[in-house]
Image (cartoon, rainbow, N blue to C red):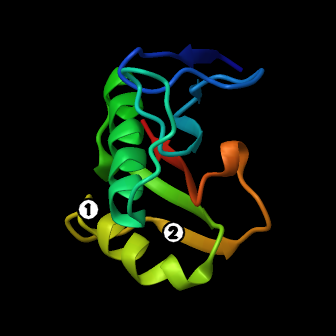
Amino acid sequence: MNKKIIQTTDAPAAIGPYAQAVRAGDFLFVSGQIPINPADGQLIRSTITEETHQIMKNIGAILQAAGLRYENIVKTSIFLLNMDDFAAVNEVYASYFSGNYPARETVQVARLPKDARVEISVVAVC
């Protein structure tokens, strides 16, 4: 199988031994993104709405580096520290698509990297 690492400075650098994304065959697997500002590497601690927007912008930058767009996303995983944030995260998330939404699950977790409140990973078709 042919595998290509996707890397861009327009999204946060990995904070561990993983790639921002990996293209394998006709799929792009984007690692979980938390609300880190790629300009300074700092975690954004603001409203859940602003944090989710930052995550979606980071995902968009990685997709763009691979020559893709949000419309190429076929599967999303959303991890929330508190399920009470579901509606706000869902509203922001939905604004990045124009229908034909990807498959998705949303789960509440005990803890996320850097104590973030939300993390999103995606799989896109190339």
Q: Which residue is mark 2?
A: 103
Could you tell me residue 41's position as x and y percent?
Answer: 49, 24
Q: Nearer the viewer, residue 94 or 81?
A: 81
| Amino acid type of the residue tagged 2 in the rendering | Ala
Q: Which is closer to the viewer, label 2 or label 1?
A: 1
Q: Which residue is mark 1?
A: 97
Q: Quadrant of residue 39?
A: top left
| Amino acid type of the residue tagged 1 in the rendering | Phe
Q: Name the side, left or right, on which 86 lies relative to 115.
A: left
Q: Are marks 2 and 1 in contact (CB under 8 Å)?
A: no
Q: Residue at (47%, 45%) from the top-left corner? A: 35
Element type at mark 1: loop
Q: Nearer the viewer, residue 104 or 26?
A: 104
Q: Name the side, left or right, on which 101 lies relative to 5.
A: left
Could you tell me residue 116's position as x and y percent?
Answer: 61, 52
Could you tell me residue 87's position as x and y percent?
Answer: 41, 83
